[in-house]
Image: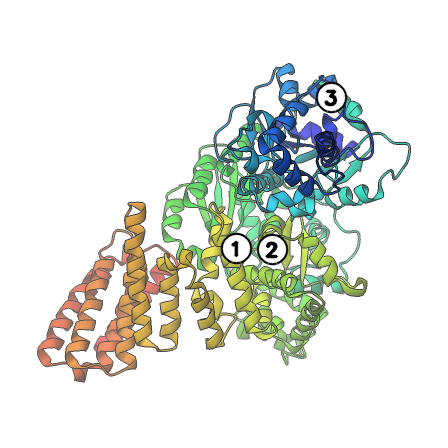
Amino acid sequence: MNKLRQLLHRARNGNAILFCGAGLTADCLNFDEDSTVGVTVHLLKLLNEDLKAGGKQSGFKDIRNAAKRYKSDLGSHRLMQRLKDRFQLKKESLSIVEIVGYPWAAIYTTNYDNGIELALHSAGKKYSSLNNLEDPNETTTGTPVIHLHGFADAWTDATFEQSCVLDADSYRYLSGVSNWLKRLRFDLEYAELVVFIGFSAADFHLNQVFFDSSGLREKAFFINRPSSDPDPDPDERMTQEEFGEPLYIGRQDFAQLVTETLQQEGPIEPKLASFHRYQSPKPSASVPPVQDIEDLFIWGRVVDEHLKRDYDQSKSDYHVRRKEVEDIQSHLESDGRIVLLNGEICIGKKLVVWGAMNGLSAGKPVFALRHSYSGLVDEACSIISSYPNAVLVVEDCFSLHASHLLGLARLISASSGRLILSARSISTEAESVKVRDLRAIPSLLEINIGRLHSEEVDPLIALIDQIAGWRDFRALSPSDRRRFVEVDCNGVIPSVLLRLLKSDYVRGKYREEYNKTSYLDVHDRKMIIAVLLIANIGFDAPISFISDLFEEDFLSVLKRASIHGDAFKLVRAEAGMVRTVPSIGARTLLGSVVEARDIVNTTIYVLEKMAQEIRRSDFQQHVFLQLMRYSILSSVVSDKTEINRFFDHISKIQYFREMPLFWLQWHIALCAEERWTKAEDYLDMGYTAAQAYEKKRGEKYNRKQLDDRKAKFLAARAISIMRSGPELFRDMKTAIDIVGRLIRDSEITHHPYETLLDIVRALQSRKNTLLDEQSKILTKQLEYIFTQAKDRLSIVAEGYQRSHADGSIKQIEAAITG
């Protein structure tokens, strides 16, 4: 009860959802107050009475059969009119008026009647009544009241059959309702509080709608009639406990609680959905046990209390404290400062960010991004408005849409707030435009996590010593161990982890855990593999995303995987997110333990499900595009037959056939097999898809990636197979023309430099095939473009891209002079 009171107070900012069942207005409609308050029961009784009075067959026990007989014997119009007449409110309750007076973000109901609308009118609140056939995306004014089972006032002879939901099975057949259920799932995920009142399991089968009960459970409450019996209806109580907390306080007491809440001072906290406020934990009281250290390194399970103890005591008993934490805090001492933290996969970015959040939270409120909803920039504005010196934290920042990322950065740079961004180095390298725009902000500081500092090596050695020891590394003496870290692993944690996670000890642990999935069915096992695939990309997935994707509660799958009470370590749920092993571990596990066929089947399933979503969040879009890439699939699947099966399968789906990216990825896969004819065909299909895209959308498709791949393809084919002189000349001239165009592009990257090197190598390997005149023409073109490439090097983005472009230039010079 206290938790409900706290959430009611906090969600006064308009971040709560009310769900009303038949019990809300049952007394107002003169329905008997009994244990069968579900509207289906009353409706069945009503239809049977009418059929009997009309001398027709009656006594039905199934609402669908009763309705079918009613329509055939008495007519659909009469059924509609009967329901419209019956579901008109006879009286109005003050308690309902008080309940709807709360600033609900939306009110959902399974009721046909207009009771909620009358109560909102009496409360002086604006509202919009929405029948289940209306468009969920239409703009509304006031509090939206959504009638999932249909709204009697809105029914006509033309819409009644489509709109009226008689029982839970009707959801499967009414597309309009399914659209609203998608919005309902989104609203419940977005909300800080969800209240069900008048709920009956006979009315609404939650397990057909809410797949993420683990996310709902922490914030959902069911208001039931008061009862002296501690367990008045065990079946209904169990259903409610699966999704939230049942409270037997009645409508009157809940209304009183709402009234008391509205009389209190409003909440300070802004409305949060994308961000959540970081709360520093209490430090653990003792030295972390070896098992917890092993769980951190091998399973990626972080115990915040141990991290807090390390920082409070300036020790590295649990993890290696990095100097970069101090660098971040130092830069963010001034207002409007931004840090972009770069680092290789599994180098410890999350732990560094955690350390900075912990230190900064002592004097400033810290808010971390959890979900990338479309309104995240507006939400950030409200945070800064309430807390001008707030610190915002966005990990894996380049998965955000450019408008969201730059919107956040510009907001902070013009305010008294601070911003921590983090990204894998490969993402920073790939997102040159986003990086360029961020670097234009003067208050940005880039910090790269690289080699361990000298004083950080010994703590890492001590931690590894507690996990698997050094038997697999053949480093027994202290000097051997230090040499292993600093020389063999180049002083970087990912190299150490790669050796550790590929060791026999860890591989055995991974195989042991994954074998627990043998107790799961194929669908549930796919769920676990999907989590590993997303971890391989470098992300933790929201629980709601995984649950909705597989239409099953993720937590229930974890319970089934935890056989004989033995916790399933491979995957877990924490703070609304699905956590698993480190990215390197996920790749190791997928590549050496999971069957290639299972990986491909899961990837196909995820892509097909995501393709059905009309609107995808920044995170979802990033995952969708990454899972389609050959480079991602081939990192965990080496079987060429399975890789081709993947592309062949999704090529039969029209959605993917229309994507230039799909054909480009299949082309790359075929190039890896040196199947040059097919590779060329599919590259042409990519260009065809680009033309269709332009015709369909009326906007220009950016062909730079297709063009660069074409030039690379022509060079690679020339090296691989013998072409005739005229064919080789035509291919090389086409490739050089493409590279010249890309080199002159205003947003030049390192890619055409690497392609230019490929062309030089191709010409050197096949120079005897060309006539002298042909060689002179191509050489002259190359010299001209090479001069341009050197002149424009300074325009290439600093860091990885420029260094790779410069490296290509040096290799070209060496090839020419050599």
Q: Would you say 230 lies left or right of 628 here? A: right
Relative vertical location of residue 712 with respect to residue 103 in this rendering, above or below: below
Indicate how the structure is coloured in the image: rainbow
User: What residue sits 14% from the left and 78% below the top?
Assistant: 726
Relative vertical location of residue 17 with respect to residue 728 in this rendering, above or below: above
Which sits earlier in the primary sequence, circle 1 or circle 3?
A: 3
Q: Which mark is residue 271?
A: none
- Quadrant placement of the N terminus: top right
Query: Which of label 1 and label 3 is nearer to you?
Result: 3
Relative vertical location of residue 466 with respect to residue 68 in this rendering, above or below: below
User: What residue sits 19% from the left and 64% below the top?
Assistant: 737
How busy is the neighbourhood of tag 2: few (under 14 within 10 Å), some, or many (20 plus)?
Answer: many
Residue 388 makes an appearance in the image: no
Q: CA distance from mark 2 to mark 3?
A: 40 Å
Expressed as whole percent of the image width and height from the top left, the position of residue 128 reads 55, 24
Q: Which residue is mark 2?
A: 550
Q: Secondary structure at mark 2?
A: helix
Mark 1 vs 2: CB contact within 8 A: yes
Which sits earlier in the primary sequence, circle 2 or circle 3?
A: 3
Q: Which mark is residue 609?
A: 1
Q: Would you say 234 lies left or right of 583 here? A: right
Q: Which mark is residue 28?
A: 3
- The residue lying toward the viewer, choosing from 75 and 168, is 75
- The residue lying toward the viewer, choosing from 289 and 505, is 505
